Image (spheres, helix red, strand yellow):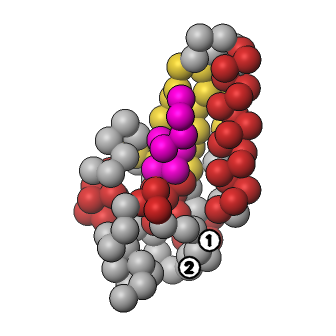
Amino acid sequence: MSTTQNPSALPLAQQRCEHRSGAPLSERGCQMMLTQVPDWAVDDSVPGGVLHRTFAFKDFHATMAFVNAVAWVAHQQDHHPDLTASYNRCTLRWSTHSVAGLSLNDFICAARVDALSL
């Protein structure tokens, strides 16, 4: 059975993003996915929701190294976050435009970012 039919067949960090269409994940679906990325949160103030997390670093160089690692993940998955970086912080916000909200892709990318050696 493919992970498209059974998204829980593999850990999120081992899945790959695919084109998504249709409706965004339900609140229940998001809550189930959050168990695999517990340091992330869903912002429901945005229609469809946004998955977000802020990372803290010791200095600007560490922040930029992280930003570049996230860029690599985003490029590999062809799924790109909104990103805000400052001297020692970086906030990532994932959503899927084609479903006007959250999809499995957002949680896959969050898990892949979590798997980076920070």
Q: Residue at x 67, y 53 (%)?
A: 74
| Residue 79 higher or lower than 61, as above or below | below
Residue 100 visible in the snapshot: no
Residue marked by disc 2: 21
Residue type highlighted by circle 2: Ser
Asked whether residue 11 is in view, the answer is: yes
Residue 114 sits inside the magenta stretch: yes
**Residue 99 in the image, given as x and y percentages of width and height:** 55, 70
Residue extent of the magenta highlight: 110-118
Camera-nearest residue between 61 and 99? 61
Q: Residue 53, percent across and down?
A: 48, 35
State the image quarter where residue 62 is shown: top right
SS label for mark 2: loop
Q: Which residue bears the numbered disc 1?
A: 98
- Which residue is drawn at the image coordinates 37% and 61% (left, top)? 11
Residue 4 % position (x, y) = 44, 81
> Could you tell whether 60 is left or right of 2 in the image?
right
Report how far apart the C-alphas of labels 2 and 1 lie in the structure. 6 Å
Q: Residues within 10 Å of mark 1 (few under 14, many from 20)?
A: some
The quadrant where residue 90 appears: top right
CB atoms at circles 2 and 1 under 8 Å apart? yes
Q: Quadrant of the N terminus?
A: bottom left
Q: Determine whether the residue tagged by mark 1 lies in a helix, strand or loop.
A: helix
Indicate whether 45 appears above or below 84.
Answer: below
